[in-house]
Image (cartoon, helix red, strand yellow):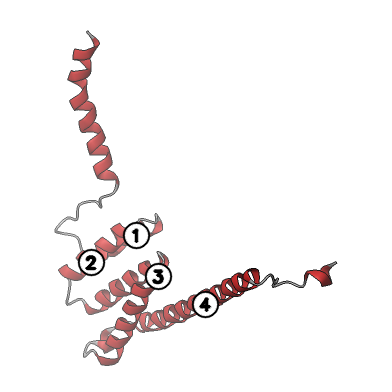
Amino acid sequence: MLRPKFIVFFPLIAFVVAVLTSCAGSPSPIDENWTAEMFFKNAQEEMDESRYKTALYYYEVFMVRYPNNYQRVIAAEYERAFIHYKTGDLKTAEAEYREILRKYEESPYAMLYPTRFEKLCTIGLQNIEKQKAIHRRLMWRRKEKEWAEAHGESLTDEEAAE
């Protein structure tokens, strides 16, 4: 007798689970009447909650909907690069920062771009270079340690500590 009840409730349970899990990772629908400000407000809220994929989505849709809003497009491009930096995708972030800086140098619309994004991209590239330098030093130190261990050596002066 339990079996028929399970069969009746199974589709309902499966439906509820499917709805709950499908909504968890997808962004809220974007109303066709969203203004530029609404895109940035919602994207910033997503970033504040560490939902970077959704924030990226909002910036991407914004750039498609408002391609002639040059000041906001450069801001969205910077935010996109910053999200890649923040999530550890340094290669993409570096390429995007460089592309934005190229636009400041070559674009006929460069005079419309807020100067802060040019400065922020330069800082972003400097931070990436610092992280690369730290990574190179750590890799070199690891190689030194591996060599020392392979040759029965130590990187520390253990005798002096005694």
Amino acid type shown at disc 4: Arg
Q: Amino acid at mark 2?
A: Glu
Please report whichever mark, 4 or 3, sits nearer to the chain's N-terminal start: 3
Which secondary structure lies at badge 1? Answer: helix
Between the C-alphas of marks 1 and 2, the distance is 12 Å
Of callouts 1 and 2, the N-terminal one:
1
Report helix, strand or loop for mark 3: helix
User: Alpha carbon of mark 1 to alpha carbon of mark 3: how far?
Assistant: 11 Å
* Disc 1: which residue: 52
Q: Residue furthest front?
A: 151
Mark 2 highlights which residue?
Answer: 60
Residue that badge 3 annotates? 85
Label 1 CA crowd tier, 10 Å (few <14, some 14–19, many 20+): many
Identify which residue is drawn at 26% across, 34% down.
Answer: 17
| CB contact under 8 Å: marks 2 and 4 | no
Residue pushed farthest right? 162
Judge depth for marks 2 and 4 and give the one in front. Answer: 4
Q: Which x, y percent locates residue 69?
A: 20, 76
- Give the Cα distance between marks 3 and 2: 16 Å
> Residue tagged by mark 4?
136
Whether residues under marks 3 and 2 lie with C-beta atoms below 8 angstroms apart, the answer is no
Instruction: Residue 127 in the image: state x and y as whole percent.
Output: 47, 77
Is label 4 in contact with label 1 (beta carbons under 8 Å)? no
Type of amino acid at the residue the image marks with label 3: Tyr
Q: In the rendered image of this protein, does residue 4 appear above or below residue 107? A: above
For image coordinates 22% across by 18% down, the residue present is 6
- The tally of labels here is 4
* Quadrant hosting residue 39: bottom left
Q: Of the two numbered discs 3 and 2 on the same chain, state the one appearing first in sequence.
A: 2
Kindly check if marks 4 and 3 are in contact, taking CB atoms under 8 A apart as contact: no
Q: Nearer the viewer, mark 4 or mark 1?
A: 4
